Image (cartoon, rainbow, N blue to C red):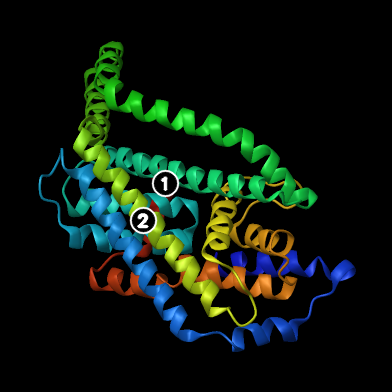
Amino acid sequence: MLAVAAAAALVWAARQFDTRGFDWRLAASSVAHLHWGWLVASCAFIAATYYGRALRWAVFLKPLKAHPSISNLFSATVIGFTAIALFGRPGEFVRPYLISVKEKVPLPSQLAAWLLERMFDLLMALLVFSFALTRLTMTGAHLGGRLGWVLEVGGKVVGVVCTLVFLLLLSMRHLAEPLRTRLTRASRFLPEEKFKRIELLLSSFAQGVESTRSDGALLLVLFYSLVEWALILGCYWCLARSFSAIVSLSWIDVLVFLGFVSFGSSIQIPGIGGGMQVVAILVLTELFHVKLELATSFAILIWIMTFVVVVPFGLLMAVREGLDWRKLRRVGRETA
């Protein structure tokens, strides 16, 4: 999975051979001249994001467990993101599974917490992207056809999706319990055993979104989400500084770059597809006029620091806790 993702960016860049050429020596030289101190700083920011995610998840757990273990949540987060790097999207469900086991709470409640986390992250990504759109509109920048498509479609999508996310959050906050009651009543025609399973499932899921009913908890989650994305921005800034001898990006440039990457990596761009590395290369070359070779090196480095660097630590934690990766992979697939 890791090798395929890295190769995808190189293959996409290599497709530009006929029209632009690709200087492999320049790409290698850009890596050789990195400022390693800034890379270490970026690792510190990334490590902090995992701890921040653990703190945010603790808020989701409050209705079920007043004092969850931050240590358990942190290890589950690190191992969960390692599973994503190794297994792909099915690995997303390893973290809710581990938290449900470690904290002895129902798995459906943690799947609900996972859904809440994804919604808050999506909301933050859209806000960052909307800033990027505003910034480009103010500068009057002219983008290439493919990146221009992101700008055109993104402007229409941001408002719609933000509205939908807000409505969904409000519905989960106020309608989760009434919906659980109605669905439970509607399931009474089922045999007793199946009815009890569905009742338990619905109750557990409703418990997972219970935290959103508290104004204080909701504000705390929003605060942790802001801190989370500030840490991600800090990581991107440090990575840009590590390339400062050959790539010059200001704080605002990095924020715009983060906005496009966070939005573009979640959609399919015509003629390109999705993928964080490919979108990052496209933004750097067409928006910031960075050479293709440097943009490719930078994009792959960002992917390594934000997704791959956690893998050794996740593997060590899993070994220490005696976890079976084959079982975790099966759990992720079955839950997905």
Q: Which residue is mark 2?
A: 228
For disc 1, the neighbor class at 10 Å (few under 14, some 14 to 19, many from 20) is some
Which is more toward the observer, 312 or 74?
74
Which is more toward the observer, 69 or 238?
238
Q: Please, is residue 194 above or below residue 22 in the view?
A: above
Instruction: Confirm or deny contact between disc 2 and disc 1 (CB under 8 A).
Output: yes
Residue at (55% x, 64% y) in the render: 1
Which is more toward the observer, 303 or 110?
303
> Mark 2 and mark 1: span between their CA atoms?
9 Å
Residue at (48% x, 44% y) in the render: 127
**Which of the 4 quarters of the picture holds residue 59?**
top left
Secondary structure of the residue carrying tag 2 is helix
Left or right of residue 38: residue 186: left
Q: Please, is residue 241 above or below residue 323 in the view?
A: below
Q: How far from the left and from the top, in percent, is residue 33?
A: 59, 88
Q: How far from the left and from the top, in percent, is residue 327?
A: 35, 58
Q: Quadrant of the C terminus?
A: top left
**Which of the 4 quarters of the picture holds residue 40?**
bottom left
Q: Amino acid at mark 2?
A: Glu
Q: Which residue is mark 1?
A: 121
Left or right of residue 289: residue 123: left
Query: In the image, which disc is placed on residue 94?
Result: none
Q: How far from the left and from the top, in percent, is residue 157?
A: 59, 34
For disc 2, the neighbor class at 10 Å (few under 14, some 14 to 19, many from 20) is many
Residue at (58% x, 61% y) in the render: 253
Q: Amino acid at mark 1?
A: Asp
Q: Earlier in the sequence, mark 2 or mark 1?
A: 1
